[in-house]
Image (cartoon, rainbow, N blue to C red):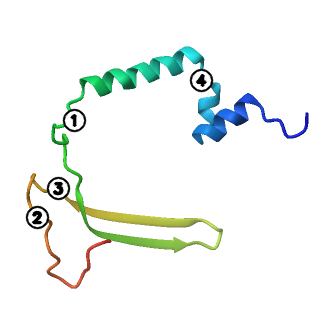
């Protein structure tokens, strides 16, 4: 039959993850019910456990070597603010990351 896809290809196409194709049915059912129970136990009105940090600056240094190796160092500076606080405004010549 031309154009037929296998079960593995169908699972990969649905989730985008090839490792999901090898998962047994009982594991998938366990994960499903685990997510349902977690949703029932979670309070949707509760504030998040930890606020997301605000990125202040990002610098990237890159070095290309003659043998084809690329060395890259990325430094990300973040600030964690208490709940309700306003993000800091840049005071120096550096601009905040978008």
Q: Looking at the picture, does residue 30 appear above or below residue 74?
A: above
Label 4: which residue?
23
Determine whether, in the image, residue 75 is placed left or right of residue 48. Answer: right
Determine whether, in the image, residue 58 is placed left or right of residue 18. Answer: left
Q: Residue at x 37, y 23 (%)?
A: 36
**Residue 60 % position (x, y):** 40, 71
Q: Looking at the picture, does residue 86 appear above or below residue 20?
A: below
Q: Which dot, 4 or 3, sits closer to the camera?
A: 4
Per the rendering, the mark at residue 80 is 3
Which class describes the residues within 10 Å of circle 3: few (<14), some (14-19), or many (20+)?
Answer: few
Numbered-mark total: 4
Q: Which is nearer the N-term, disc 2 or disc 1? A: 1
Q: Which dot, 1 or 3, sits closer to the camera?
A: 1
**Residue 17 % position (x, y):** 59, 39
Q: Which dot, 3 or 2, sits closer to the camera?
A: 2
Determine whether, in the image, residue 51 is placed left or right of residue 16. Answer: left
C-alpha span from label 2 to label 1: 24 Å
Which class describes the residues within 10 Å of circle 1: few (<14), some (14-19), or many (20+)?
Answer: few
Q: Which is nearer the N-term, disc 1 or disc 4? A: 4
Per the rendering, the mark at residue 86 is 2
C-alpha span from label 1 to label 3: 23 Å
Q: Looking at the picture, does residue 20 appear above or below residue 28?
A: below
C-alpha span from label 4 to label 2: 45 Å
Label 1: which residue?
44
Q: Which dot, 1 or 4, sits closer to the camera?
A: 1
C-alpha span from label 4 to label 3: 38 Å
Q: Looking at the picture, does residue 36 appear above or below residue 57?
A: above
Q: Which is nearer the N-term, disc 1 or disc 3? A: 1
Q: Are marks 2 and 1 in contact (CB under 8 Å)?
A: no
Q: Residue at x 17, y 77 (%)?
A: 90
Q: Residue at x 64, y 29 (%)?
A: 21
């Amino acid at each position: 039959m031309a154009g037929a896809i296998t079960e593995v290809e169908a699972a990969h196409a649905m989730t985008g993850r090839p490792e999901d194709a090898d998962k047994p049915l009982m594991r998938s059912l366990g994960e499903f019910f685990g997510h349902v129970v977690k949703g029932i136990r979670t309070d949707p009105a509760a504030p998040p456990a930890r606020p997301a940090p605000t990125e202040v600056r990002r610098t990237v240094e890159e070095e290309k070597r003659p043998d084809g190796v690329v060395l890259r160092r990325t430094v990300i500076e973040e600030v964690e603010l208490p709940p309700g606080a306003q993000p800091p405004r840049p005071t120096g010549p550096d601009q905040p990351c978008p």
